[in-house]
Amino acid sequence: MKTFQLEGSKRESTGKKAAKAYRKESLIPCVLYGGKEGVNFTVEKEGIRKLIYTPEVYIVHLTIDKEEYTAILKESQFHPVNDELLHVDFIQVFKEKPVIIEIPVVLEGLAEGVKAGGKLSLEMRKLKVKGLYPNFPEKLVVNIENLGLGKTIQVGQLVFDNLEILNAKDSVVAAVKLTRAARGLAAKG
């Protein structure tokens, strides 16, 4: 899994007023959970940009006032009108403690149903998994070569080493849908 270096400094004050003041200085208020106690800190807006605006998942190496932490991005909050980044939550991770994270799904291969005129549809872009962070892959690769026309791949059919998938077993990950052209061919045949 890819890593991301991020530096921050502890916040002296918390609350709405303080958060607004930090944002005016192009600093983003953040919180690190999961350790003995939560750590309130700020990071520069430009420093965190590449971490927030990407579909990829990173292990974040946080340096907060010379203290080192290993974490993952848990949640980012945006302004409802102007989409400005307001707040970021991180969760501290440890090698021996399982953590829950969403990992992107990538489809691999050319489905039989697509060759027959169907349309491939990725229904779930990310899957929620539980495991130890050193075991997390950058993406979950799902082979769809045997996926026929009108067929689906469900969460219950997927197995990944050292990971437990937490999504509902009957949720559809990918499907090959019938197109009008495919239906027409099926009716003629």
Image: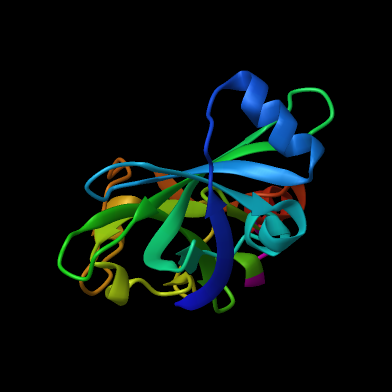
**Can residue 45 be spotted in the picture?**
yes
Instruction: Assess whether residue 163 is covered by the magenta stretch.
Output: no
Q: Residue furthest right?
A: 82
- Identify which residue, 132 or 4, lies in the foreground: 4
The residue at 55%/72% (across/down) is 4
The residue at 37%/66% (across/down) is 70
Give coordinates of residue 164: x percent, y percent. 22, 58
- Identify which residue, 100 or 140, lies in the foreground: 100
Q: Residue furthest front?
A: 12
Numbered circles on residues, count: 0
- Identify which residue, 98 or 91, lies in the foreground: 91
The quadrant of the image that shows the N terminus is: bottom left
Give coordinates of residue 33: x percent, y percent. 35, 44
| Residue 69 left/right relative to 63 | left
- Identify which residue, 19 or 91, lies in the foreground: 19
In the picture shown, does residue 120 fall above or below 124? below
| First to last magenta residue range | 115-119
| Residue 158 left/right relative to 188 | left
**Can residue 151 be spotted in the picture?**
no
The residue at 78%/46% (across/down) is 26
The residue at 47%/73% (across/down) is 138
The quadrant of the image that shows the C terminus is: bottom right
